[in-house]
Image (cartoon, coloured by chain):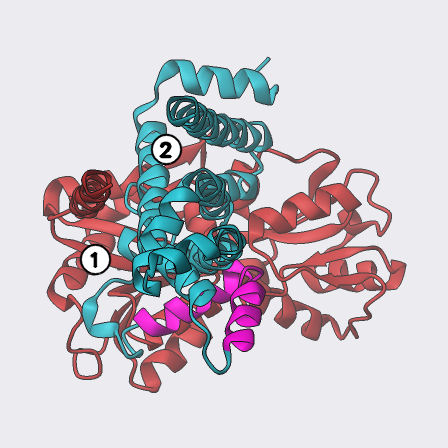
Amino acid sequence: MKKTLNLVLASIVVMGLSLNTHARDYIILASTTSTENSGLFESILPKFEEVAGIEVRVVAVGTGQAFELARRGDADSLLVHDTAGEQRFVENGYATERTDVMYNDFVLIGPTNDPASVREAKTAAEAFASIAKAKAAFASRGDDSGTNRAELRLWESAGVELVRDWYRELGSGMGPTLNTAAAMDAYVMSDRATWVAFGNRQNLTLLFEGDDVLFNQYGSLLLSEQRYPHLKHELARQWHSWLISEDGQQAIADFKVNGQQLFFPNAN
Amino acid sequence: MENNAFYVALSLLLSLDSSLIQIVVLSLQVSLMAVSIAAVLGFPLGAAVALWQFPGRGGVIVILNALMGLPPVVAGLMVYLLLSRAGPLGEWGLLFTPGAMVIAQVILVLPILAALSRQKVEEMLGEYREQFVSLGMSRSRMMPTLLWDARFALLTVLLAGFGRASAEVGAVMMVGGNIDGVTRVMTTAIVLETGKGNLPLALGLGIVLLTLVMLINAGAYMIGELSRRRTG
């Protein structure tokens, strides 16, 4: 019995040690589901790791939760897409620097038969208004993410009151929301990257794109050294600088899914 | 063919894809370690509650039983707040590491092991009581004897705990962060692939996970049967 007990204890210790194999320099990057789900990080991170020797560990959550992680001091760097929220984050002293990194755009997805005739809309506001008028099912992220915040701004500009029988707040990430929209033939607003890389479209198709208000800007933030002295500021700065450097911007432009470029660098 | 989950699962298993192996190994490491720690703490705890009479004992039993139903996401949230930099144990720097995932799973598994072993040991105590009294054994001497003689039942309890650990996703997602190559395990990988709309791949990973759990259960069953036969 004692032998077995010793064996168990020894194996616990061995397992514990083997869990701690990552001795390399690393930072925690809080970012959004759209950048992770589209495969952007898989494409650009190895290039950065090669030149800098720094591992970037991505925690992909909604933009709202990413801000919260950073606010509590749990992330070394932030890459999100809610410019107004990012500027407030800097003003409130949580971050010291914010820079444009890249952009893409939001697109309006819906069932192929298009019961609200969104295809014929001239502007995004018109498209949103026609969904509300037809009371066609609309699947909203409802999770305080960057996409969710942008969507709510668009409803407001369309002057629409959101009614629960057709407007459905799902409270989930972009991918799960697209899965649900596909299952209930609902309209949904998605960032283009997640949509292009999405594999379960069923009856959904792209119905509206191209309005300037659908512009989706991503920004990188450096957190306050004063407020968070324990963070890896030096390593985070290297990552931030690489992202907006020529190499980093080129790496972003080189990332393609099915031959289509998904993020457009615009740092300078 | 590529859209068939069983085909995907089979080709995943046969190709021995290195990132899949890493995910599987980490899943097993985290869950086995959590179950081991929970067993070292939970079995003596369960036996102690069975053996000793103390004020509030009924309350302890009710709490242990109720905690068997603790939602994983609540356990995850508690551990997150504990290990977050703004939390009391933030200094440890454990958040978003496998260590944090182990802690969260220990919290989930411990009540199961303690509550169920309490019940088994109490049953056994009923059978053995007269013998113990005639030998004049103290309670602390009874504990190892009872735990040892209940070992076959406790093996099943251990498997129930392992099932809980390997199947949950809410806690490890929150405290591990599903970081590629660092804290990504089977269940969080399945959530990620579902999010990407890669449903056949997600289901394929699910089948791989199920196969692993089945193998571990089969192994435990055989060990149990073999030693049962040996000890008669």
Q: Which residues are magenta?
A: B57-83
Which residue is denoted by mark 2 in the rendering? B24
Q: Residue at x 51, y 21 (%)?
A: B9
Query: What is the three-letter code of the residue carrying label 2?
Result: Val
Residue toward you, B113 or A185: B113
Residue toward you, A144 or A2: A2
Q: Quadrant of residue A6?
A: top left
Which residue is denoted by mark 1 in the rendering? A27
User: In the visual, does A227 lie left or right of B57?
Assistant: left
Please tell me whether residue B92 is drawn above or below residue A107 in the rendered image: below
| Kind of element beneath mark 1 | strand
User: In the visual, does B131 lie left or right of B5?
Assistant: left
Please tell me whether residue B30 is drawn above or below residue A97 in the rendered image: above
Q: Residue at x 25, y 73 (%)?
A: B90
Q: Furthest-bottom residue in view?
A: A92
Instruction: Answer whether residue B109 is magenta in the image.
Output: no
Colour assignment, chain B: cyan
